[in-house]
Image: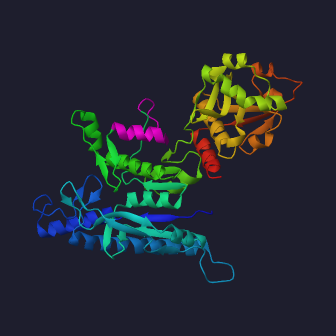
Amino acid sequence: LGMKIVLVAGCRHQIDLRLDDIDNEEGNDGEDGASLGGRVMMSSIRVTDEETLRVVKEEAGFVRFEIERRLARSLRLHGGLVKGSESLIGNVVSGNFYSAQPFGIVDGIDYCWTGFPRKVETDRIHQVHETNDIVLLTSLGVSPSGEIFNVNSEFLAATVAGSIGASKIIYFNVHGTSFQHKTTGKPVQNLRVSDAKNLLAHYKTRIHPKGFALVDLDGDSPQQSETLRTPGSMETLIKVGYSMVALEKGVKRAHILAPENGALVQELYTRDGCGTLISRDLYEGIRRADVNDVSGIYDLIDPLVRMGTLVERPKSQLEKDIRSYYVYTRDGLIVATGQLKRYEGGFAEIGCMVVSKDYRRGGRGDAMLGYLERLSLQCGAKKVFVLSTQTMEWFVERGFREVPVESLPPSRQALYNKKRKSKIYMKEIDGDRDLDAAELWWSNK
């Protein structure tokens, strides 16, 4: 399917079980004694002393070879062989694709052999992908001096994804906790970056640049404290935090899924998915126009009016209809505009789509179209149409299809200019996931 995959294998569960067994054998409940070895501090980072590092090495090695074994079997059964040879289509390659550095001493605690990513070998990863192989990373990173460090796997995944310019990062949520709308009770499947930031701010959760999660348990808010002390809720918030790290490093989409059979395929290859999708705010800079924008909009559309591409819109008309216009600004300059009109029967019209000639290759037209489509959906209009005499192909490439005048709502049919003979193109939007898929396509162009 053309995917270039990097797997980051964590082994926290296996390490916890081993350390519990060791504590039980030694008759230590883990709370007494001076050593902090193996203890998980600050919600996500383990103190890795010499004994714990030995356990981490053993469990990381076991997880690595178990994944390689299972993937090799699957690739042999389903991947097939390269034509004319005995070589498999795709293999699993693991190794030192990143270097690590020590975490150091934080708040008086020496984290010993706990570390965080120092440098990702992006060229080597791309070389492996060129041969259709899968890159497998573990939480063990090696420093230039040869020291081995235990690295947080979620932070490692976010760092690697940002370094290689990944389109998606996918986290599995062990407890399977998801978000629900507090009014409707329905699952929340989509979050924008701004929504995720607000969520993390509300629960006072953030990710430190070294990769550990900081969660402020607010004693003044019993409900918040109760939520954060629920393992599934805490884990989900931390996964959202690491997702934000990846998005801020340039990754376009982050998915959080329950580890259920078929969940990955359902999330990636069905319209509705089954997890939570967090996407970058590709519409930053777009806002509703006001009367102060009339002159800027007029100057932007006037060349196209004189060419006959757009219908003439005098400033008085623009001022009258200004609340239906939206503008894309950069450093205070209007570089794109669009208009959205609602009609009866769940219809909406997108018109006056113009991008300044100096900014036409930056995806701003797609961003404006996507923004207006989302507004239409939020207003209950699932059928979006445009009228065009020159730019028909652009809309066809974005999912619109030509329809007759009779497909328009009655009130818009009455206003149709038969002399201009504009062609009509319509698109039905089923939900946010349709728009998310479209965004991923044009944001990768």
- Residue 20, picture quadrant: bottom left
Q: Seen in the image, is 254 located left or right of residue 307? A: left
Rendered location of residue 341, percent (x, y): 68, 24
Rendered location of residue 334, percent (x, y): 63, 32
Rendered location of residue 2, percent (x, y): 62, 63
Residue for point 71% across, 33% down: 353
Residue for point 63% across, 24% down: 293
Q: In this view, does 22 lie above or below 183?
A: below
Residue for point 77% across, 26% down: 408
- Residue 90, picture quadrant: bottom right
Quarter of the image with the N terminus in it: bottom right
Q: Can residue 188 be seen in this view?
A: no
Q: How many marks?
A: 0
Q: Is residue 125 visible?
A: yes
**Which residue is more in the foreground, 172 or 110?**
110
Which contiguous range is marked in magenta?
182-202
Residue farthest along the right direction in this orientation: 419
Q: In this view, does 85 lie above or below 54?
A: below
Assess whether residue 425 is covered by the magenta stretch: no
- Residue 52, picture quadrant: bottom left
Colour convention of the picture: rainbow
Q: In this view, does 26 lie above or below 400?
A: below
Rendered location of residue 291, percent (x, y): 62, 19
Assess whether residue 201 is covered by the magenta stretch: yes
Q: In this view, does 212 lie above or below 127?
A: above
Residue for point 67% across, 16% down: 320
**Which residue is more in the foreground, 119 or 14?**
119
